[in-house]
Amino acid sequence: MKFLHLVWSNLKRRKLRTLLTVLSIVVAFLLFGFLCAIKAALTGGVSMAGIDRLVVRHKVSIIQLLPQSYEARIEQIHGVATAAHQTWFGGIYQDPKNFFPSMPVMPEKFLAMFPEFLLPESEKQAWLKTRAGAIVGRTTAQRFGWKIGDRVPISSPIWGRPGHEHNWEFEIVGLFDGAKKGTDTSQLFFHYDYFDEARVRGKGMVGWYTVRIKEPDRAAEIARKIDEEFANSPYETKTEPEGAFAQAFAAQIGNIGTILIAVLAAVFFTILLVAGNTMAQAVRERVEEIGVLKAMGFSNTLVLALILGESCLLAGVGGFLGLGLAWLITSSGNPVPSLLRVFYIPAADLAIGVALIAGLGLLAGLLPAAQGMRLRVAEALRRGA
Amino acid sequence: MHALTRWFAQIATVTLFNLRTIPERKGAAIAAAVGIAGVVAVFVGVLSIAEGFRQAMTISGSPDIAVVLRSGANTEMTSGFGREETRLISDAPGVAHNEHGALASSELFVIINLLKRSTGTEANVPLRGVEAAAFDVRNDIQFLRGRRFERGRNEVVAGLGAAREFDGLELGRKFAVGRSQWEVVGIFSAEGGIAESEIWSDASVLQAAFQRGPSWQSVYAKLTSPGAFAEFKDALTSNPQLNVKVVRQTDYYAEQSTALTKLITTIGVFIAMLMSLGAVFGALNTMYGAVAARTREIATLRALGFGGSPVIVSLLIESLALALAGGACGAAAAYLAFDGFTAATLNWQTFSQVAFAFAVTPKLLVVAILLAAVIGLVGGLFPAVRAARLPVASALRGA
């Protein structure tokens, strides 16, 4: 610790060079933070999935509908606790660009199935009592400035006009928040009964079921039993754990993970080169001084540690600044809510960032430090000036 | 005139001197050049994804083909027509005819799940039900292997892109849709366009398999000429029995690709801008180091009578040369690695996969090299100005 002053003064020698190196490291970690946020937005469904939930959809593809009568039959299957359905409404508010997901559900069952949606009890009761009522996530409510009591007109190209009305209109009776940071609070949910009565086509059909099972370890077995129940029927099903469903969905976008890792690898490689070069220059310029230190009695290991300390301090200052800035910016709001549903840096990725900072510091200083360690005192004192 | 020539001569001398001493500063020069190469490579790589996707979506659009959807639908999946409506649309003025009748195909668009080869998980694949006229309506369908499907049978033809990206679409293979088996009897190409990501079958067979009854979702009509579009559209929109949206195929495809193209381009440009900022800092570092290492030499030049501006210009040229060298390497690497690389992704608007190839276009390469040049110039500016302002006497003394 007492050598911190020595390390710090060495860095302050060439202030401009140190500043520029630190700034490039800041930029690299800023980029790292943003890319982690983008990855979380595109693939987040996987980590938010419930371990005791399965998704049951039509075997051919999710755009095919299933009968609402399946609900009772699914709940009869051994190992199933409860089943709740949702249907893709495809609602549009004013402009297709304002897109957010909207689904008709059975309120009580839905809220019980998804405890991660936090709705105050009073608002839940209001919802149960209001037939054309809807609850909306805080993100979307803030985006359009909706408050409880507002009447919101939503059109649906898929389902057309509701019965004899001109357009679908819902009264906002509740705003829900997410229990976890990555929970999607951009959705709107309304009554299935109101939906089924008002729609002109496809009555009695729903989009997909979410099923809560009693034993998560038996998930694959129960999923198979559900599919067997409906095999050879006009509406065959495919059941899988919610995590697998989200994973397959994310994989449809492409191997996002691989692309982002490739980009980050390129970025970090160049940063390593920049920082490493700075450290090498720094050591080269101070050959004589290192000789003096060694002549004074500093051991080889201590010299190694000093140089490594310098590079780690450099990486540390730049890295924490960059990560901190990225964290601040992502916490302050989502700039593109229609493209990215959530916008945050998962804690796991922040931890990876810190590990990368340490790695960068050590790797950048390694070669110069090894060189410094091996300098012979007499030679070092002779060089220089 | 003489002064100008002398000025140029000075610049040339100092520049050559600077460039020749680069090997002495190998480490820093390589670091800056590699940094810029990295920026260029990532920029070209990510934007080639957007460009490739856009090309796949729009290259197959033809201005003399019209797409008719139900009014209010922005994609085929949310549209719907009955038999009467499709008949009225096919009989509208402006539609071309051949010996079999009107060149109009009423079509159905559904999604099935097949295993995506690259990830091993299931993905949404578009399955289109068409009428016999469909192959004559579209200008660019060519059969590479096999034959057309026969009407009334569980047969499909697969686009080249779909066959490549998804498992089980080889000629002669059967795949299951619901409870029936469908056989792949042909593979077609569509000049790299969107149809290559689709699987086509007979509309009536699809209607039966998916329990749709006599309903279709779109009508693709070949017009007598691109100019006949106005007549066709007016006839349909003024017909009180129809409630339709009529667009040219080119405009329809452009609409379908905007969201994803915008997302990828935005992310790509954002990443490139941040990386460029980092590269600027790296370049600044190198050039300041260059100036610091040659303080005495520059001061000597100044003392000999070389002006301040030749020193600035020569340092800028040196920085530019390093940046362009790095940029060219990055561009070449990106071209070799990415151009033509095939992939498939989810188009949110149609909720199904689109197969495309990364496209490294000349325009993209030019923009990337320009970016490298800008980084080089910005990175060289401040060090150059500092070099020109060195106090000659103290610099000579070796401060």
Image (cartoon, coloured by chain):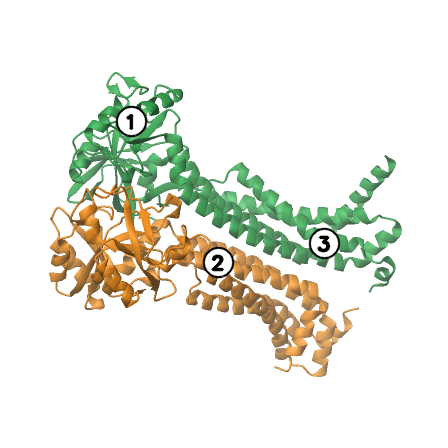
For residue A34, the mark is 2
Mark-to-mark CA distance, 2 and 3: 30 Å
- Amino acid bearing label 1: Phe
Residue B154 as seen in the image, left or right of residue B382: left
Residue B30 falls in image quadrant: bottom right
Q: Is residue B272 visible?
A: yes
Q: Which mark is residue B135?
A: 1
Question: What percent of the width, then of the height, locates residue A206?
Answer: 20, 50
Alpha-carbon span between mark 1 and mark 3: 63 Å
**Other-residue count near label 2 (Cα within 10 Å), few / some / many at <14 / 14–19 / ≥20:** many
Q: Secondary structure at mark 1?
A: helix
Which residue position is annotated with label 3?
B382
Amino acid at dot 2: Phe
Query: What is the number of the mark on residue A147?
Result: none
Whether residue B185 is visible here, answered yes or no, is no
Residue at position x 79%, y 58% from top?
Answer: B295
